[in-house]
Image: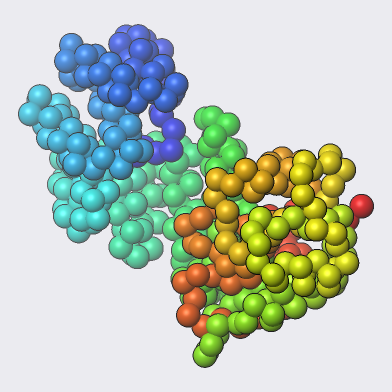
Amino acid sequence: MIGSRAHEVFDAGPEERALARPRHLAREGRAAEAEMAYRAALTEQPNLDAGWIEWFQLLSIEQRWDAALELAREVQSRGGRSALALTLAGAALGGQGRHREGLLELERAIATEPDFAPVWFEIGRAAFRLGEHARALLALDRAFALEPGPETLYLRGEVLRSAGRYTAAEVAFEGAGQTAESPEQRLAADDQIRVTRRFAALSAGKPDQLGLAERWFAEGGGVPLCRQGQSLPASDGEILDTFVRLARSSGWQFTELRRIDAWNGWADLAAALELPLAHGPLEASAIPLVVAVRPAGGADEWQQSLRHVHGQGRGLVFVLIQRENDTAADVAGTFESLTASQPDPSLAMLCARHPESRLRGRILAP
């Protein structure tokens, strides 16, 4: 489908031979060379629908929606398939955020060719972005009936989850994984199953009814110690106390505390957990508690600690303040965008014990 997460797989034949080089370049991530190769192939054979679609996918991955819209117009000017040109235009307009305009182009495509599967997929995507879940699901059902594929089931799962239909969403993602055409598609589907299960654990309603802390857990599996409050932000002491309670009740037994910055509160946390403050290279057997006031970006000790924790599966990373656009910690005290927050030990415990949390399978005690 147009704009899907992986390139389509097409049957061998003249089309396969004509597009072999641009596809190879695209798979290797050489996007600029792949574009040139698609242009060369389509200059000689402008009726290769698959080539236009795959070229469009390259542009959409890079969010180059102006160029994608120009490509749609080029299909039309070269006498290409009218339904394809209109579908590409509608998808590009949707990428620009012009969803209503995009839907008009997609409806024109349906009038031209009502059994063209990609246009129904794009109508499903546009309706989903507009919050029209019922229309999105009907369009995706039509797309799947015309051309079964994992990307349609994947988007169907996203629509169902957004509507709060978690069980049905999980079934859709499972179907996407079972019919996946590449390892990347299977991994993406498995990841969305975990996201869906985390949302289901927190809400009987829709995901957008959850607060920031709950959504952060659901989307990435990290453990929040605070949620939205009514008045003042939680104090640093309250956050550290909540972490200590969580660590003790969860049976976490770290071998050392590694602080990435010089904040005095880390010494208090080390004392409360009876941990030595460590420096230098990490031993392979270490189960470190790695702490920072905020994610420490490119700091050498931070990166070394992350490699140990996530690469070896030992210990965890705790930040006092999580920025939403930074690398997610395993445990976050509070969030930079929250003007008011309060500790919630029950939420923290639920998230830490959830089988799909970031801590799943992590070694947190000798």
Left or right of 344: which side holds 252?
A: right
Q: Is residue 70 above or below residue 15?
A: below
Within the image, what quadrant is residue 48 found in?
Answer: top left
Quadrant containing the N terminus is: top left
| Residue name at image x 16 percent, y 48 percent | 105
Furthest-right residue in this view: 366
Q: Is residue 173 above or below residue 149?
A: below
| Residue name at image x 57 percent, y 57 percent | 295
Left or right of 105: which side holds 34?
A: right
Q: Evaluate whether residue 296 shows in this view.
A: yes
Q: Identify the colour scheme used.
A: rainbow
Residue 113, x across and y down, in percent: 20, 38
The number of discs equals 0
Q: Evaluate whether residue 206 shows in this view.
A: no
Q: Is residue 239 above or below residue 151?
A: below
Furthest-bottom residue in this view: 231
Residue 125, x across and y down, in percent: 34, 51
Left or right of 217: which side holds 82?
A: left
Furthest-left residue in this view: 77
Residue 147, x across and y down, in percent: 39, 36
Left or right of 328: which side holds 142?
A: left
Front position in the image: 172 or 144: 172
| Residue name at image x 57 percent, y 61 percent | 294
| Residue name at image x 27 percent, y 48 percent | 95
Residue 139, x across and y down, in percent: 34, 52
Within the image, what quadrant is residue 175 found in?
Answer: top right
Front position in the image: 288 or 101: 288
